[in-house]
Amino acid sequence: MSNLDKALAYAAANQEANLNELIDLLRIPSVSTQPERAKDVQAAAHQVVHILTQAGLENVRLIPTPLHPLVYGDWLHAGPDKPTLLIYGHYDVQPAEPFDAWESPPFEPTIRDNYLYARGSSDDKGQTHLNIKAVEAYLKGAGTLPLNVKFIIEGEEEIGGPSLEQFIPANQSLLQADVALVSDTAMVSSSQPSLVYGLRGLYAFFLDVTGPDHDLHSGAYGGAVNNPINALAHIISQLKDGEGKVLIPGFYDRVRPLSDEERGLLAQYPRDDARVQKETGAPQIWGEAKFTLNERMGARPTLDVNGIIGGYTEVGTKNIIPSTVHAKLSIRLVPDQDPGEIAHLVQQYIQQIAPPSVKVQISSRGGAPASITDFSIPAMQAARQALAHVFGREPILMREGGSIPVVGAFQEHLGMETILMGFGLPDDRIHSPNERFYLPNYTRGTETVIRFLAAYGG
Amino acid sequence: MSNLDKALAYAAANQEANLNELIDLLRIPSVSTQPERAKDVQAAAHQVVHILTQAGLENVRLIPTPLHPLVYGDWLHAGPDKPTLLIYGHYDVQPAEPFDAWESPPFEPTIRDNYLYARGSSDDKGQTHLNIKAVEAYLKGAGTLPLNVKFIIEGEEEIGGPSLEQFIPANQSLLQADVALVSDTAMVSSSQPSLVYGLRGLYAFFLDVTGPDHDLHSGAYGGAVNNPINALAHIISQLKDGEGKVLIPGFYDRVRPLSDEERGLLAQYPRDDARVQKETGAPQIWGEAKFTLNERMGARPTLDVNGIIGGYTEVGTKNIIPSTVHAKLSIRLVPDQDPGEIAHLVQQYIQQIAPPSVKVQISSRGGAPASITDFSIPAMQAARQALAHVFGREPILMREGGSIPVVGAFQEHLGMETILMGFGLPDDRIHSPNERFYLPNYTRGTETVIRFLAAYGG
């Protein structure tokens, strides 16, 4: 029996125990953006330390940061002629609000119809966990690994990963590896695997607009005092046009034009308006007329208001000119836009268009560049082979619209490419109520990672 | 000793008891727009019934409506050759949110530096109460009144008075009088009285914009699905321009042009940018360049977003395309704009500019026309005389920017003019935290109304 077969057998024999361990991790509401959840985030980090230790990893430790801890572990006994793989994941999750939109509570994992429902089940606790379980299957089943492995698991991915961003350049030798593996993306469908070679970047900011220093009677002062909500609407309406083109001067200056080869690759992804409409329930699919749906969803920058609140928001009416309004915005970036430069352009433009009758404050909430992986490298070939074996179909190479800030940082500071081999599905409802993970993908994902380790380690 | 002197003496002797009775009324949080306060609104109505009865009024009763009760009372023994006065007031108040912005709790009336602080102290429980106390001073001090008096006091003024609007045309003989008296406005300053001869009308509506049927990951779907908050910002930005001109086609068609005489009257009100800036704390005074400050604040229509909420509004960031956003808007109308016609224009225009990639729902929240009072009538002369006597200065005739829907209804259904003799001050912070009533105006207001009854009754 080969070491690969031993690892596969071990994983098969431990399916139920693995799932139960994941369910326990999902019970912890490790919402990184909510200060009142800080202790839960900490508890989830300790749980990950425990899981890595039990899996047979060495040097396992919790690394404190100014915010939420990192977790590290490694196994480096495959020898210097074998490659070293850095596996990244995150144990923090998005907020679960609104709670009443969940069919079962977000932090009480529930299995229905072959899906595991819980916040974080797909993004990213479930996918992080199956990577650990694949490594464990080798270590426990075969007593060894075909390559050297390091794990770095963070608790701030959903807030842009500020601590890891600092940690990577300061700890290059600890994290140095030949390639990184990240499972934090979705496949095309349960029968069609994919490998993501491009990700969008992100720049997030808050806009606070203040008019009078207290709420005013709109009859008494209407006509003399500008309304901060109306003023904010004017500002937002000047940030992008009705079909989604961003109007900030200089915004597109560094956008790398799509080559014909890339447009061809992007066209392979089987997606059309009807499918996206069904997934989202939107009244109509929308966007820049000059680009295809796949190009708009993965290879074009966007700008969205994520939330807004101001004035009287209780039941009924209240005829006021409110004092203030708050909006949260984010921009998805593509290669070669620079988050710092975009932040500067946003700041400059908004200050220029803001009327002097209101005060506008822009608070930067961090950013990360977009990334593109060279798909000719050996690890990419190993990933294609593993996915093709388990799912019976060649993976589609694609770009995804989301942002995984760490991928850009690996490229910049460690000169390292990342394999984005995800096992989520497009209708997993990540970041939404009723997030779920397709259970057959949990098992197949574990098997795929085991086969990837074998193929890449040689 | 004349009956007038007896009434004045009675009022002077009962100042403290009157104030304590008002304080008890202010303790009741009769917020008409909040369904959970319905019982408090009911309790305030019963309290008003009690106060009218104690004052010596007859036929005092609570009149149920589909929402909050009306309170009626009268004294009709002055004889048919004497005029009949209808005194109107309202016992409901605006919401007090945000509670933490109040220096003392809104429903625990507190006296500081000659001001009585409480929600409703100025708008309008305090002013309604002093009218009742003036009539009581005559009835109890002199045993009679120099004219016939009816009271109608409502509990829905802050939500546009829908029940009274139905009640007036259906109960014309009950309410019929020669003129109405309303104390629900502000003077120029504590030393400069005024009489309001014009009020703006109101049309309020809600806008709900829905995109996808659940919150989406803004990376996964950004570029393919329109964002309802961005779409709403585009709609709001097309409702009025940056200096306040409303862009809805037909909106100004019926606006009565300002005559030179009116522009002259409006110019008498001593107000400038610096004063309004101090009162409001706005960074800059603002509005239509073609009109003066007084014209913009009283004689021009306006459009304001009163509140907005949508998407993620908790602490931190959440990178979503939200499913839905809700906005509350209101329009201040001037003669001769018609609320029903304006509602139609708003509906038509928004449906026309709304993109098909979102669903827009417009919910009408009622309206009332603007009003203008003929200032040559005898009751207006009596009011000028009473104010001049008590405050030592001729009142300024002015138009006010707020809306008192009932004034238009009195004009339309009872053919009756209204005397708007208010004792509030511009910095009473009505509709805002820390609403207050200047206590010397409570006493002087009572005396003024007593002298008005004498002068008008003859």
Image (cartoon, coloured by chain):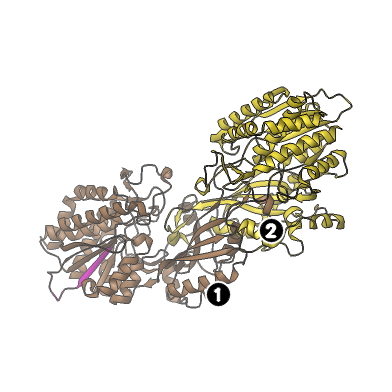
Chain colours: A yellow, B brown
Q: Is residue B346 above or below residue A180?
A: below
- Whether residue B252 appears in magenta in the rendering, the answer is no
Crowd class of label 2 (few under 14; some 14 to 19; many from 20; radius 10 Å): many
Q: Which mark is residue A362?
A: none
The quadrant in which the C terminus of chain B is found is bottom left
Along the line of sight, the residue nearer the viewer: A247 or B384: A247
- Closer to the eye: label 1 or 2: 2
* Amino acid at pointer 2: Ala
Residue A92 lies, with reference to residue B412, above or below; the image says above
Q: Nearer the viewer, residue B69 or B398?
A: B69
Q: Is residue A151 visible?
A: no
SS at mark 1? loop
Q: Residues within 10 Å of mark 1 (few under 14, many from 20)?
A: few
Q: Secondary structure at mark 2?
A: loop
Rounded to the nearest angstrom, the CA distance separating label 1 from label 2 is 32 Å
In this rendering, do the residues under marks 1 and 2 share a single chain? yes
Question: Percent position (x, y) of residue B439?
Answer: 29, 50
- Pinpoint residue B219: horizontal percent, then vertical percent: 69, 50
Q: Which residues are magenta?
A: B78-88
The front one of B55 and A449 is: A449
Question: Identity of the amino acid at label 1?
Answer: Pro
- The image quadrant that residue A251 belongs to is bottom right
What residue is shown with label 2? B224
Residue A427: x and y in percent read: 65, 51
- Apparent side of residue B230 relative to residue B223 in the rendered image (left or right): left
The chain under label 1 reads B
Q: Chain of mark 2?
A: B
Can residue B357 be seen here? The reply is: yes
**Quadrant of the frame with the N terminus of chain B:** bottom left
Name the residue located 51 percent from the left edge and 45 percent from the top edge: A99
Q: Which residue lies under the disc numbered 1?
A: B249
| Mark positioned earlier in the residue sequence (1 or 2) | 2
